[in-house]
Amino acid sequence: MIRLFRLAVAVGTLTSVAQTASANTKTFDNTDLGYRIALPVQCRHEEGPGTLEAVCAPDLDPKKSDDIQAAGAILLEIDAEIAPTDAKPYTEVEFRQELAEAVCGEGDTNKVRLENVSASKDDTGATFTARVVCPELRFLGLSERHAETRTVIAGKYRYRLMVRYPKDDADIAKPLAKAFFDSFKVTAAQ
Protein backbone atom coordinates (compact mmCIF):
# COMPACT_ATOMS: atom_id res chain seq x y z
CA MET A 1 0.00 0.00 0.00
CA ILE A 2 2.78 2.44 0.93
CA ARG A 3 4.69 1.53 -2.25
CA LEU A 4 1.56 2.18 -4.33
CA PHE A 5 1.05 5.56 -2.62
CA ARG A 6 4.70 6.51 -3.23
CA LEU A 7 4.32 5.53 -6.90
CA ALA A 8 1.19 7.69 -7.24
CA VAL A 9 2.99 10.66 -5.65
CA ALA A 10 6.02 10.09 -7.92
CA VAL A 11 3.86 9.95 -11.07
CA GLY A 12 1.99 13.10 -10.03
CA THR A 13 5.21 14.94 -9.26
CA LEU A 14 6.83 13.65 -12.48
CA THR A 15 3.92 15.01 -14.51
CA SER A 16 4.15 18.31 -12.69
CA VAL A 17 7.92 18.48 -13.26
CA ALA A 18 7.59 17.73 -16.97
CA GLN A 19 4.83 20.30 -17.47
CA THR A 20 6.57 23.12 -15.62
CA ALA A 21 10.26 22.42 -16.27
CA SER A 22 10.96 25.43 -18.46
CA ALA A 23 8.68 27.82 -16.55
CA ASN A 24 10.21 26.91 -13.21
CA THR A 25 13.90 27.36 -13.93
CA LYS A 26 16.37 30.11 -13.32
CA THR A 27 19.14 30.58 -15.87
CA PHE A 28 22.65 31.25 -14.61
CA ASP A 29 25.19 32.86 -16.94
CA ASN A 30 28.79 32.60 -15.80
CA THR A 31 30.85 34.90 -18.01
CA ASP A 32 34.13 34.20 -16.17
CA LEU A 33 33.91 30.46 -16.81
CA GLY A 34 31.96 30.66 -20.06
CA TYR A 35 28.75 28.69 -19.52
CA ARG A 36 24.99 29.01 -19.15
CA ILE A 37 22.76 26.57 -17.29
CA ALA A 38 19.20 26.44 -15.93
CA LEU A 39 18.29 25.17 -12.46
CA PRO A 40 14.89 24.51 -10.89
CA VAL A 41 13.57 27.47 -8.88
CA GLN A 42 12.03 25.12 -6.29
CA CYS A 43 15.54 24.18 -5.13
CA ARG A 44 18.06 25.89 -2.90
CA HIS A 45 20.87 27.40 -5.00
CA GLU A 46 24.38 27.49 -3.61
CA GLU A 47 27.31 29.16 -5.36
CA GLY A 48 30.98 28.85 -4.58
CA PRO A 49 34.19 29.46 -6.50
CA GLY A 50 33.59 27.61 -9.76
CA THR A 51 30.66 25.64 -8.31
CA LEU A 52 26.92 26.04 -8.64
CA GLU A 53 24.45 23.63 -6.99
CA ALA A 54 20.72 23.14 -6.80
CA VAL A 55 19.72 21.17 -3.71
CA CYS A 56 16.19 19.84 -4.16
CA ALA A 57 13.74 18.10 -1.87
CA PRO A 58 12.32 15.00 -3.63
CA ASP A 59 8.84 16.58 -3.80
CA LEU A 60 10.36 19.87 -5.07
CA ASP A 61 8.85 21.79 -2.15
CA PRO A 62 10.90 25.02 -1.85
CA LYS A 63 10.58 25.14 1.96
CA LYS A 64 11.84 21.55 2.29
CA SER A 65 14.62 22.28 -0.22
CA ASP A 66 15.84 25.08 2.05
CA ASP A 67 16.38 22.62 4.91
CA ILE A 68 17.40 19.34 3.26
CA GLN A 69 20.97 18.04 3.51
CA ALA A 70 22.71 17.90 0.11
CA ALA A 71 23.90 14.32 0.68
CA GLY A 72 20.34 12.95 0.75
CA ALA A 73 18.72 15.39 -1.70
CA ILE A 74 18.37 15.48 -5.44
CA LEU A 75 21.54 17.42 -6.24
CA LEU A 76 22.27 19.16 -9.54
CA GLU A 77 25.81 20.50 -9.68
CA ILE A 78 28.23 22.10 -12.09
CA ASP A 79 31.92 22.56 -11.33
CA ALA A 80 33.83 24.68 -13.82
CA GLU A 81 37.48 25.54 -14.08
CA ILE A 82 40.08 26.94 -16.41
CA ALA A 83 42.77 24.33 -17.02
CA PRO A 84 46.36 25.43 -16.44
CA THR A 85 48.17 26.19 -19.69
CA ASP A 86 50.64 23.36 -19.02
CA ALA A 87 47.96 20.76 -18.17
CA LYS A 88 48.13 17.46 -19.99
CA PRO A 89 45.05 16.47 -22.03
CA TYR A 90 42.16 15.10 -19.95
CA THR A 91 41.44 11.46 -20.77
CA GLU A 92 38.93 8.75 -19.93
CA VAL A 93 41.45 7.33 -17.42
CA GLU A 94 41.37 10.56 -15.35
CA PHE A 95 37.60 10.73 -15.73
CA ARG A 96 37.17 7.22 -14.31
CA GLN A 97 39.68 7.84 -11.50
CA GLU A 98 37.96 10.92 -10.12
CA LEU A 99 34.33 9.80 -10.39
CA ALA A 100 33.96 7.77 -7.19
CA GLU A 101 35.13 10.47 -4.80
CA ALA A 102 33.77 13.43 -6.81
CA VAL A 103 30.27 11.95 -7.02
CA CYS A 104 29.89 9.80 -3.90
CA GLY A 105 32.24 11.60 -1.53
CA GLU A 106 35.00 10.21 0.59
CA GLY A 107 34.47 6.76 1.96
CA ASP A 108 34.67 3.26 0.62
CA THR A 109 35.16 4.16 -3.03
CA ASN A 110 35.81 0.48 -3.85
CA LYS A 111 32.06 -0.16 -3.61
CA VAL A 112 31.14 2.59 -6.09
CA ARG A 113 29.92 1.19 -9.43
CA LEU A 114 30.57 2.93 -12.73
CA GLU A 115 28.21 2.11 -15.58
CA ASN A 116 27.84 3.22 -19.21
CA VAL A 117 31.15 5.09 -19.25
CA SER A 118 31.75 6.70 -22.63
CA ALA A 119 33.95 9.31 -24.25
CA SER A 120 33.52 11.25 -27.46
CA LYS A 121 35.69 13.84 -29.13
CA ASP A 122 35.05 16.38 -31.86
CA ASP A 123 36.55 19.61 -33.18
CA THR A 124 35.41 21.63 -30.16
CA GLY A 125 36.63 19.30 -27.40
CA ALA A 126 35.62 16.14 -25.59
CA THR A 127 32.69 14.84 -23.56
CA PHE A 128 32.85 12.03 -21.00
CA THR A 129 29.69 10.53 -19.53
CA ALA A 130 28.91 7.90 -16.92
CA ARG A 131 26.29 6.60 -14.57
CA VAL A 132 27.51 6.16 -11.01
CA VAL A 133 25.98 4.10 -8.20
CA CYS A 134 27.01 5.17 -4.70
CA PRO A 135 26.61 2.51 -2.00
CA GLU A 136 24.31 2.86 0.99
CA LEU A 137 25.98 4.52 3.99
CA ARG A 138 23.94 3.27 6.93
CA PHE A 139 25.98 5.08 9.57
CA LEU A 140 25.05 8.39 7.86
CA GLY A 141 21.47 7.35 7.12
CA LEU A 142 22.02 7.55 3.34
CA SER A 143 20.36 5.08 1.03
CA GLU A 144 21.93 3.99 -2.24
CA ARG A 145 22.32 7.01 -4.51
CA HIS A 146 22.57 7.15 -8.27
CA ALA A 147 24.14 9.82 -10.44
CA GLU A 148 24.39 10.85 -14.05
CA THR A 149 27.59 12.72 -14.76
CA ARG A 150 29.12 14.47 -17.71
CA THR A 151 32.51 16.15 -18.07
CA VAL A 152 32.88 18.54 -20.99
CA ILE A 153 36.27 19.79 -22.17
CA ALA A 154 35.93 22.90 -24.33
CA GLY A 155 39.13 24.77 -25.15
CA LYS A 156 40.77 25.79 -21.89
CA TYR A 157 37.62 25.07 -19.82
CA ARG A 158 36.54 21.92 -18.01
CA TYR A 159 32.95 21.49 -16.83
CA ARG A 160 31.78 18.63 -14.61
CA LEU A 161 28.00 18.31 -14.47
CA MET A 162 26.34 15.91 -12.09
CA VAL A 163 22.85 14.99 -10.98
CA ARG A 164 22.84 12.71 -7.91
CA TYR A 165 19.71 11.38 -6.25
CA PRO A 166 18.48 8.72 -3.81
CA LYS A 167 17.62 5.55 -5.73
CA ASP A 168 13.95 5.78 -4.71
CA ASP A 169 13.65 9.27 -6.25
CA ALA A 170 14.73 8.30 -9.78
CA ASP A 171 11.29 9.00 -11.31
CA ILE A 172 11.46 12.62 -10.18
CA ALA A 173 15.21 13.14 -10.71
CA LYS A 174 15.50 11.82 -14.27
CA PRO A 175 13.42 14.57 -15.96
CA LEU A 176 15.29 17.15 -13.86
CA ALA A 177 18.58 15.63 -15.03
CA LYS A 178 17.54 15.72 -18.68
CA ALA A 179 16.48 19.37 -18.44
CA PHE A 180 19.70 20.23 -16.57
CA PHE A 181 21.99 18.58 -19.13
CA ASP A 182 19.97 19.95 -22.07
CA SER A 183 20.19 23.50 -20.70
CA PHE A 184 24.00 23.50 -20.44
CA LYS A 185 25.68 25.67 -23.07
CA VAL A 186 29.32 26.65 -23.42
CA THR A 187 29.38 30.40 -24.05
CA ALA A 188 33.17 30.93 -24.02
CA ALA A 189 34.93 31.53 -27.31
CA GLN A 190 36.79 28.43 -28.40
Image: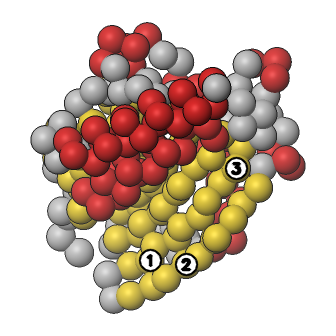
Name the residue type under label 2. Ala
Name the residue type under label 1. Ala
CA gap, disc 3 and disc 1: 23 Å
Left or right for 147, reference 177: right
Query: Taking 180 as reference, is 114 above or below it?
Result: below
The crowding category of the residue bearing disc 2, from other C-alpha atoms within 10 Å (few below 14, some 14 to 19, many at least 20), is some
Mark closer to the observer (1, 2): 2
Q: In which quadrant of the rendered image does the C terminus lie?
A: bottom left
Which residue is labeled 1 in the image? 126
Query: Taking 20 as reference, is 130 above or below it?
Result: below
Residue closest to the far bottom: 123
Pointers 1 and 2 in contact (CB under 8 A)? Answer: yes
Residue at horizontal 78 percent and vertical 49 percent from the top: 112
Query: Taking 83 as reference, is 50 above or below it?
Result: above
Residue nearest the viewer, comparing 46 with 4: 4
Pointers 3 and 1 in contact (CB under 8 A)? Answer: no
Which residue is labeled 3 in the image? 133
Could you say which disc has been placed on residue 119 in the image? 2
Query: Taking 190 as reference, is 142 above or below it?
Result: above
* Spot occupied by residue 63 in the image (x, y as percentages of width and height): 33, 11
Mark closer to the observer (2, 3): 3
Residue nearest the viewer, comparing 164 with 108: 164
